[in-house]
Amino acid sequence: LLLFNSCAKKVLMPHAEQNAREACEENFYSKFHMFVSEEEQKDLSKVKTLQECRSFLDKFMNIRDTDPTTPENEWEQMIEKRAADVENEALSSNSGSAGFFFSGNGGFNGDTSKVYMLHGLPDYMETLNNGRLYTDLMIWIYLDDRGNHKYRFLFYQRQGFGSFIILRPSFDITYSLQEINKNP
């Protein structure tokens, strides 16, 4: 079963040449998928050659350039740095998240990586180790220019194991408490 699951990897670009698939799907999309719109994903699935891949990437990056009047693409530099931070486990030695590894939390597909790629390094982060009854929690807080909370993300480990995932509170508080309880 494990053998079949590893072979069943979804291919976004089924008709692409191998080098185009490596460049666009494996090297680009695997890291930056959270920025790709549905329309862009459709366009990407039609890419067949390395030249088409490069054209897609140029267009993708150029429309997001925060200051087209400069020779560099500031947005591209920002997300490339964030991707490097994820790959280099930049948070593993941070005082608020010591011992935290993106690779152990789903890599680029994990909730923590997606938040990091979208918002960057949090202004405040802390891991709360909760012992026997409740799972560990991790909070990330992003501040606005005036120092007020702009975004808050609370991550937890479902039943105390595995990756940190975003706690998505429901209207049923009992359900939310069961999600962070090690022995629901």
Image: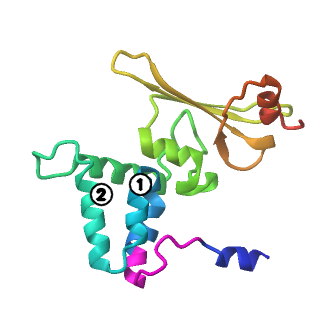
**The disc labelled 1 sits on which kind of residue?**
Val
Can you tell which quarter of the image residue 32 is in?
A: bottom left
What secondary structure do most residues of the magenta stretch adopt? loop
Looking at this rendering, what residue extends furthest in the bottom direction?
Answer: 17
Residue at 56% x, 55% y: name it. 109
Residue at 78% x, 23% y: name it. 173
Q: In the drawing, what numbered circle is on residue 36?
A: 1
Q: Is residue 34 visible?
A: yes
50 sits left or right of 21 in the view: left
Q: Quadrant of the C terminus?
A: top right
> Where's residue 127, x and y in %?
63, 33
Query: What span is colored magenta in the figure?
Result: 10-22
Can you tell which quarter of the image residue 131 is in?
A: top right
> Where's residue 130, x and y in %?
77, 30
Q: Is residue 120 visible?
A: no
Is residue 139 a member of the stretch shown in magenta?
no
**The disc labelled 2 sits on which kind of residue?**
Phe
Residue under numbered circle 2:
60
Q: Secondary structure at mark 1?
A: loop
Determine crowd level at label 2: few under 14, some 14-19, many 20+ residues with C-alpha closer than 10 A: some
